[in-house]
Image (cartoon, grey):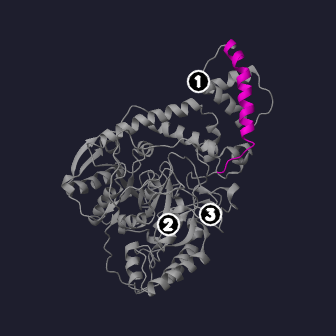
Amino acid sequence: MRSAFFLLIAGFLVGCGSSEPFSKRDVQGAQKVAGLDFTDEELRTMRRNLERNLRSYSELREHPLDNAVAPALWFEPRPPGFVMPTGTSSFDVRLPEARVPEDREFAFLTVAELASLLRTRAVTSEELTRYYIDRLRAHDAELQAVVTLLEDRALAQARAADREIAAGTWRGLLHGIPYGAKDLLAVPGYPTTWGAGPYRDQVIDRTATVIRRLDEEGAVLIAKLTSGELASGDRWFGGRTMTPWDSTTGASGSSAGPGSATAAGLVPWAIGTETWGSIISPSTRNGLTGLRPTYGMVSRAGAMTLSWSLDKIGPMCRTALDCAIAFSGMLGQDPEDPSTVNAPVQVGQGRDWSSVRLGYVKDAFDRDSTATGDNARAAMEVFRAMGMQVDSVAFPGPVNWSGVISTVIRGESGAVFDQLLQENLDDSLSWQSSSSRANSLRQSRFIPAAEYIQANRHRALLIMSMDSLMQEFDLLIAPSGAGGAITNLTGQPAITLKNGYRSPDDRPEARLPTGISLIGGLYDDGLLLDAAIAYQQRTDWHRQHPPRFIPGGRP
């Protein structure tokens, strides 16, 4: 406890920018924040060490660290004795027969349908690129989902794709497909704003690995879409990103722009990121299929760091099949991101659903008697009808896992954005509330080092507990968001699927999507995708779109 206090008081004084000698009263006040109670003699004996620590931290701050610099310690999601899957990835995707719409309105065609049209040269990538850029321009004033259009870059990519396809060179399912990316990902020559005013003019002279890999697949990046401020919420320096389902409701976050733009048919799909809920939540709010892959499946090199041990990158699409197609072009090991692994992902190989053990998180289902809960129970019955072996399950307890993940995020993000606080730029962030990133970063200065380490020790036990649980089940199912703290801490994959609608209590006329989440074991992303695809083959929620954004739909 005392080592914790050592860092707490030093962090408190440095974090507050104090340069004056501190008094005994200062230390007495600070210890209360850590729940400590030292005697006067103990306070006297530690004073010299506290002063020495303060000088040491100040000296370190004379050597600022770039956001990309990671700590020497790396998070490992695999418990002791875990056996990595072997084999090679395979995505057996059969393209549907697709026709060009008579009105040439492509807004809600799936990635698979667009790939079919491009491969047969029924449409060009340049036409699709111009079409979606026009839609982004037409609707962004309402949705506020776009930070930067990459029109010149996109058109050059589209024309190159058209030339290659015309010459008989087809790179694969993403060749010529437009998409958007959350504005945490670096693209040289364009701002990478992280959704925050202090960085709105920041240009990072590198290409994020995931963008580079999609470039190699022939995909066409048309826009950098909004991130909530420093990956928090749906508010950013330009305003608030709204859901296309309701003009008064935010898109949720922090992958707000990818969620809103994809749901509105402004892009065929988009890249999102998640630390705790930032793919699952906006995918649910906007009625999308969002895949949060296993930690380490997609490189984060060139992406803004919020939390080294929690950050993940994944696709946000309108269908599970589209998620599989997008994911195929994103995954793989990267020497620039030591957390990445080469784990095989197999989709479309055929599954015997009667052999799949599905655990439903009973407490999460039982405590929701609203339309959201009814929709979740109906979705579970779809999986039961597929032949899955369904049984109840409970997440490990009794630890408050939300508190654990909050400690981890704040501890790591406080280090990442230490310089922002030192320069008092947190005051220039546009969102200043108790739940804002600005406030979270300030709080981070009061997390003792020992408490951060204790949180991660509990996390290690959680990883082993969840590994034992996943020996009994192949998949878990819960209303979207349930278990989010636990499964982000363990690094397990999850996918959210639209399963109906709800109306807010104060606005019964509104209709917002609801979702169900499937959770897999480590590196079981392929099973997760196959189960999601099978669910959507038996339901049509994913085919229902925001009416006001359907070309020719009601205003």
Q: Position of residue 444 (x, y in %)?
A: 61, 38
Q: Nearer the viewer, mark 1 or mark 3?
A: 3
Q: Earlier in the sequence, mark 1 or mark 2?
A: 1
Mark 1 — residue?
A: 35
Name the amino acid, label 1.
Gly
Q: Earlier in the sequence, mark 1 or mark 3?
A: 1
User: Label 1, label 2: how many angstroms apart (C-alpha)?
Assistant: 48 Å
Marking on residue 213: 2
Judge the density around disc 3: few (<14), some (14-19), many (≥20) Cα neighbours within 10 Å.
some
The magenta segment: 41-66
Indicate whether residue 9 is drawn in magenta: no
Q: Residue shown at 49%/43% (left/top)?
A: 75
* Frontmost residue, 318 versus 415: 415
Indicate whether residue 51 is drawn in magenta: yes
Name the amino acid, label 3.
Arg
Secondary element at tag 1: loop
User: Label 1, label 3: how many angstroms apart (C-alpha)?
Assistant: 45 Å
Q: Residue shown at 26%/49% (left/top)?
A: 358
- Look at the image and tell me whether residue 4 can be seen: yes
Q: Which quadrant of the structure image shows residue 343?
A: bottom left
Q: Earlier in the sequence, mark 2 or mark 3?
A: 3
Mark 3 — residue?
A: 206
